[in-house]
Image (cartoon, grey):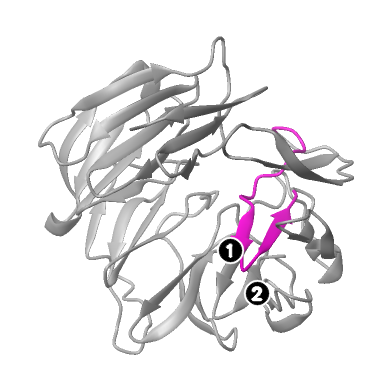
Amino acid sequence: MDVFRCLKAADGQEAWSHRTPAAGNLDYGNSPRATPLLHDGLAFLQGAFGDLACIDLATGKSKWAINVRDEFDAKDERKWGVCDSPLIADGKLIVAPGAKDASLVALDPKTGKPVWKAPGKPAGYGSFIAATFGGVLQIIGHDAETLGGWDAKSGKRLWTLKPDRGGDFNVPTPIAYGDKLVVTTENNGTRLYSFKADGTINAKPVATHKKFAPDTHTPVIAGDKLFGVWNRLYCLDLKNGLKELYDESNAAFNGYCAAVATDTRVLIVSKAGELILLDATAKEYTEVSRLAVFKDEKGVYAHPALVGTRAYVRGTASLVCVELA
């Protein structure tokens, strides 16, 4: 079963839970990959087999539910399941079934009914963003083979970008940085793209950094710096052609890490369950503090959630609330 739980931030007590059958066999287990989306008093919950539920946030009662793969006739085999986190853009709920006639879909958040369907290729394993480039609000993300931008209003595909080297898993989420886009994948490294006046992308990147090439980790932006982990921690200068400001070799950065950031701080959660707080304004690697949250933890994959000055970190078997102030 998929079990989604809503917990009270103050004390961790369960407010409600939602359960959906999740029979099957996926690499890394059957549990959901997608981050729940909270919007306008509703929670949108998507499981790894494509089950999407709209839940009343206050009561936990189901408003509607569909399976996006069955509903739109997706046929491809999903080794790692459905991974994209639901997205709200232009008042629509965006999901990626990866079907031939519905690669990307916009739903009415209130009813779950389709607003538009964009044909295309099977889905990648990452999430999409909504960003405005060239005056066009667009949905940006990967399918199985390419990076693309879709008009948020109509679903029309505006541009397609195929990387120089194929075979990327297309897991890391693209990041908007002002009027540019940061893209990073394991076979093509990190790239910074600009856009034309009509909102289409310039195929040649403004800057590249080949060494920082994470396969699953999504980097974060703090001020004008890009921080990310790929066998070590990298800090790149976004204003100066992705110049490497520093890198840091540390056992905590050997495996997968999740990260969140403000303009002055970067919080990294290691796979072993350590919280590492960095000073993002420093010219060299500077730890503010470090805390081991879990004992004997072998696989923290979830991103931390922030409520006020508290961080909520989920390990294999428990959820821990940490006061950051």
Residue 232 visible to an observer of this rendering? no
Magenta extent: 28-47
Badge 1 is on which residue? 143
Give whichever of 40, 242 is nearer the camera: 40
In the image, is 122 to the left or to the right of 278?
right
Q: Residue at x 12, y 32 (%)?
A: 284
Residue 109 vertical position relative to residue 145 in the rendered view, above or below:
below
Marks 1/2 in contact by CB < 8 Å: the verdict is yes
Q: What amino acid is found at the position of numbered circle 2 in the picture?
A: Gly
In the image, residue 46 lies in the stretch drawn in magenta:
yes
- Residue 295, given in percent of the width and then of the height, sits at 54, 10
Q: Please report the residue visible at 26 percent of the width from the left and 40 percent of the height from the top.
A: 265
The answer to whether 69 is drawn above or below residue 155 in the figure is: above
- Say which of 83 and 121 sits in front: 83
- Residue 311 x, y percent position in the rendering: 46, 35
Say what secondary structure mark 2 lies in. Answer: loop
Which residue, given by chain and number where applicable, does mark 2 sit on? 120
